[in-house]
């Protein structure tokens, strides 16, 4: 299975996944014009209202989220059980206890969530990281936040395992990778590239940066000289393919260079405007 790249069209103000909306699901990504949806720069009350506005617009009561920690833990929503998974790079993750009230600041720590219920709108926030939305056409749905750490810990595959645990064949799953920083703009240093190779092996997701025309070195993580370009879409699409997912869609829209209406941590951090989008997936009730 090869991934298909198709830009998500703007429909009623929101970027929509053609593959998932074609299944009768709600699958969307918020533009910057809708305001920031998460993070510490903008007021929490404002961001909560922005999320609720998106949910209401899509016909849901609220956006169900997790406290993202750049890992590979996946939880069930509503939050009653967890799916801890060991990876080659990390010891087994502890299971969550049953969650209390789903109030701001009390979301369980995880980077993916899934549900088998209609009327639940799952959400993951992103401002360069890849939002991964996956659905069984007739059953479970899930969403994951995949930055470089989550990608190297295979969070997309962890989510697939949770979705197929109910008996669904992986080939029935439809996955969509939303707007994120592209390999055109995401450069990393040798140390980080070595860690990614250790966890994922070598592949088309790591591209050596070749200076041309005497250009100054590109800036990598924490200001160090960049040595590699990291293709988050390629890495996650490969993981989904290896997990047997039948349909994989890639938005191919770079949050850093794709336009002012996409939040990007890297393009806005110098101005103190690090807003965050939310990618949502739900089955109407």
Image (cartoon, rainbow, N blue to C red):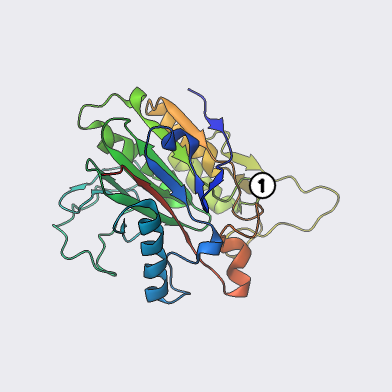
Identify the residue at horizontal 26%, vertical 38% (top origin): 162
Asked if one can make out residue 70 in the rendered structure from this viewpoint, the answer is no
Direction from residue 88 to residue 37 in the image, left or right: right
The answer to whether residue 276 is above or below residue 186 is below
Q: Callout 1: helix, strand or loop?
A: loop
The answer to whether residue 174 is above or below residue 141 is above
The C terminus sits in image quarter: top left
Identify the residue at horizontal 40%, vertical 31% (top origin): 174
Name the spot of residue 213 as percent of width and height, x first: 86, 49
Say which of 276 and 53 sits in front.
53
> What number of labels is visible?
1
Label 1: how many Cα within 10 Å (few below 14, some 14–19, many 20+): few
Direction from residue 145 to residue 269 in the image, left or right: right
Direction from residue 60 to residue 46 in the image, left or right: right
The answer to whether residue 117 is above or below residue 276 is above
Name the spot of residue 59 as percent of width and height, x first: 34, 52
Asked if one can make out residue 52 in the rendered structure from this viewpoint, the answer is yes
In this view, the residue farthest toward the right is 213
Residue marked by disc 1: 184
Identify the residue at horizontal 53%, vertical 57% (top origin): 31
Say which of 151 and 169 sits in front.
169
Direction from residue 220 to residue 285 in the image, left or right: left
Say which of 235 and 276 sits in front.
276
Name the spot of residue 88 as percent of width and height, x first: 34, 41
Name the spot of residue 35 as percent of width and height, x first: 50, 66
């Amino acid at each position: 299975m090869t991934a298909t790249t198709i830009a998500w069209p703007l429909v009623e103000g929101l970027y929509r996944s053609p593959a998932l909306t074609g299944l009768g699901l709600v699958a969307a990504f918020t533009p910057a014009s809708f305001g920031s949806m998460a993070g510490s720069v903008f007021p929490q009350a404002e961001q909560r209202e922005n999320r609720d506005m998106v949910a209401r617009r899509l016909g849901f009561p609220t956006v169900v989220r997790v406290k993202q920690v750049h890992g590979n833990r996946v939880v069930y929503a509503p939050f009653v059980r967890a799916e801890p998974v060991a990876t080659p790079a990390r010891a087994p993750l502890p299971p969550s206890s049953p969650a209390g009230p789903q109030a701001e600041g009390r979301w369980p720590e995880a980077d993916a969530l899934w549900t088998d219920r209609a009327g639940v709108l799952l959400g993951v926030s992103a401002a360069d990281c890849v939002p991964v939305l996956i659905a069984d056409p007739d059953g479970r749905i899930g969403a994951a936040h995949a930055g470089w750490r989550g990608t190297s810990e295979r969070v997309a595959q962890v989510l697939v395992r949770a979705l197929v645990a109910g008996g669904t064949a992986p080939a029935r799953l439809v996955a969509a990778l939303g707007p994120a920083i592209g390999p055109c703009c995401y450069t990393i240093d040798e140390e980080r590239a070595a860690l990614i190779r250790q966890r994922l092996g070598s592949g088309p997701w790591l591209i050596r940066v070749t200076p041309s025309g005497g250009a100054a070195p590109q800036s990598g993580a924490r200001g160090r000289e960049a040595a590699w370009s990291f293709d988050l879409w390629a890495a996650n699409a490969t993981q989904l393919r290896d997990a047997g997912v039948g349909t994989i869609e890639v938005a191919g829209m770079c949050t850093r260079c794709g336009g002012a209406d996409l939040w990007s941590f890297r393009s806005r951090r110098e101005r103190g405007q690090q807003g965050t989008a939310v990618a949502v997936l739900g089955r109407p009730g």
